[in-house]
Image (tube, rainbow, N blue to C red):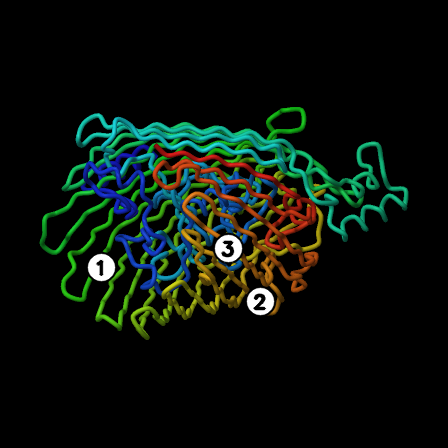
Amino acid sequence: MLRLLLVSTSLLGLSAPAAAAEEVATNTADATGYHAAPSVDIVVTAPYQRDRADLLSGVAVLQGEELTRSLRPTIGETLARTPGVSATSFGPNASRPVLRGLAGERVRVLTDGIGSIDVSNTSVDHAVAINPLLADRIEVLRGPAALLYGSAAIGGVVNVLDKRIPRAVPDEPFHADVIAGFGSAATERSVSGAVDVPVSRTIVVHADGSYLKSDDLRIGGPVLSRPLRAEALASDAAGLSTDEVDFGANARLRGRLPNSASETWTAGVGAAIVTDTGNFGLSYSHYDSLYGVPVRFATAPGQEQEAPRLDLKQNRIDARAEVKTGGGFLDTIRARFGYANYRHFELEEDGAIGTAFYNKGLEGRVEFVQTQRGVWKGASGVQYLARDFNVVGDEAFLPRNQTEQIGLFTLQQFDFGRFKAEAGGRFEHSALEAQAGVDQPQFLRGKRTFDAWSVSGGASYGLSDMWRLGVNLSRTERAPSAEELFANGPHAGTEAFEIGDPDFAKERAYGVEAVLRGRGDGYTFEASAYHNWFSNFIYDDRTGAIEDGLPVFQARQADARYYGFEVQGSLDLARIGDTVVTADGLADYVHANIRSVGPAPRIPPLRLLGGLGAEGRKLGGRVEVEWNDRQDRTAAFETETGSFTLVNASLNIRPWGDERPLSFIVSANNIFDVNARRHASFAKDFAPLAGRDIRVTARASF
């Protein structure tokens, strides 16, 4: 690992930073980068800024007051009202985004263009080590540009942008951002702050921190879903309850989600040199969280019933650099690097460590942005990733393993005015090696290597100055992860016995997507429809067997087909003085089927969301209704999920208008206290969503 760290560090020294996010602000001593957010019509998750209208796939941007109103303790729940996005919702503390029905290994969660370097992709009960409280902007991207960040981004990319490595030097003695909030459903108390201080005209230092504490989540009804309550009551009626497990009591649980309290704090420091010809910055951060995992209450004899808590820590170093070449074939060279030492302990009810997860990882990328020549613009680069992952304890379901990947990628664009075209490609070599312990099956020992080739291309045509229609085609390949290859054992967090397959082949997908975007005086519209055909699609199959008191989930491969659509739009209805009244809405749907098997597991149903808002200089408000359809297309041993409707309202108060950026947001979520369950959640039968939740958030930037 030390050798890999030295290699990546030397690569970083060649040039400078990456994730295109440095273009969010100017590279001069200008406070604009601190007091004005970039437009939502500009997407920065690419080698260079791009107009949203030109992208050939669905995209979402969350920032400003919309981000503040949506903030939750997890990335998944923060993005859950975004088109095409659901969440794993494994309780209020571990929720990862689900993009178009794809999750886990097929969705990359990034911080400023580099992976979160945690184990959230390993299991749904593992939290993402990124704090939304410190985010300035979150972008969700699918399609050709997502391939720049790895074959694991076959479902898409979620990129969280912050200021831990500053991108500009403020022209004031210091700049500070503070946010504090309270949520009633979990008695959630949170505060975060960041400060940037210019040391000179070109040097700026940064410090940030956050703290969040919550109690057990209040829910709008029973803990267990109707099928599980019926099973528990039947077990109790048959006289099967014992001193250890009271099935009748489990069936009657309601109002609170046991073992869902949490406490999380973070701290970080950074510094950067910013000039007209480039910049270089470093940062260090610490993430510390202790949270409970919702109990999978036993409903029949032989089932385990545990209440584990996770004690999570991550120490991380990041670097970013950029140099402008001054002309020639290349315009800019950027680099980005991250290294993290992560561990978490799964704690028994008495506080003893049951299973320990250790993960050391690094990721680095160098991007070469070409000088625009007439209609031609593009960027190419190299990406390196290494991971050393080990699980220790009685429930070590995965042998120690190492993953090493190197990828080469390019994205080329051609702009002929009304007609635009782009093509992208990625080659990725992956090597995965496992060392089975003495008490683990020896067939898990071994090394697999994969060469994955992915290509995409598309074109768009301007129907008018404000409307554009685009189509993209893609062929992608993904190497199986170590978890999919080598898992074999019980996992207390998910209360499942997980089994992989070391003989898996590469996963392949062919996709087509059409996108229509338009905007005009007082309206916006965006729609996308997609169809993906998978071969060797990896999925987890609940077999019906029980081992070590846990249901067995076997990883398998088969052909699969995913298709669906997303539509969103807004319309200004009226203008009263400085107040604009706007209606907006979205709809999304995904249909997924595994050949010769049936519906894929945990696919979100049709969703409709509509809102009515009014925004003025000092005051704004919004009322929205979200309806989720019933999901009765279920996999084997998967229960149906009933439809539900959530009604939310919020009030934004800016006492001094935009001149002094202080704002308060008061929101009421799930006003009618509905007992809602998200079908994409592994835990939906024993962990409902939050009940009525009154939230108050204050945000200041000065």
Q: Is residue 165 left or right of residue 545?
A: left
Viewer-nearest residue: 282 or 215? 215
Residue with the mark numbered 2: 593
Q: Which corner quadrant holds the C terminus?
A: top left
Residue at position x 51%, y 46% from top? 76
Judge the density around disc 1: few (<14), some (14-19), many (≥20) Cα neighbours within 10 Å. many
Residue 412: % across, % down: 24, 62
Among numbered discs 1 and 2, the one appearing first in the sequence:
1
Q: Residue at x 41, y 40 (%)?
A: 135
- Among all residues in the image, which is located at the extreme front? 577
Q: SS at mark 1?
A: strand
Q: Position of residue 537 (x, y in %)?
A: 51, 61
The answer for how far apart the CA atoms under marks 1 and 3 are is 29 Å
* Numbered disc 3: secondary structure: strand
User: Type of residue at label 3?
Assistant: Val
Q: Is residue 503 visible?
A: no
Q: Amino acid at mark 2?
A: Asn
Give the left or right position of residue 582, taking residue 22 as reference. Answer: right
Residue type (three-letter) at the residue carrying disc 1: Gly
In front of the other: 236 or 443: 236
User: Which residue is label 1 attached to?
Assistant: 378
Q: Position of residue 59 (x, y in %)?
A: 40, 58
Task: Please tell me which residue is depicted at 34% across the width and 39% down the height of the picture.
Answer: 659
Q: Quadrant of the N terminus?
A: top left
Give the x, y percent position of residue 162. 36, 39
Q: Nearer the viewer, residue 165 or 238?
A: 165
**Residue 396 is drawn in which quadrant?**
top right
Q: Is residue 642 above or below residue 306?
A: below
* Residue 615 tag number: none
Q: Decide which of tag 3 and tag 2 comes sooner along the chain.
A: 3
Alpha-carbon neighbours of circle 2 within 10 Å: few (<14), some, or many (≥20)?
Answer: some
Q: Secondary structure at mark 2?
A: strand
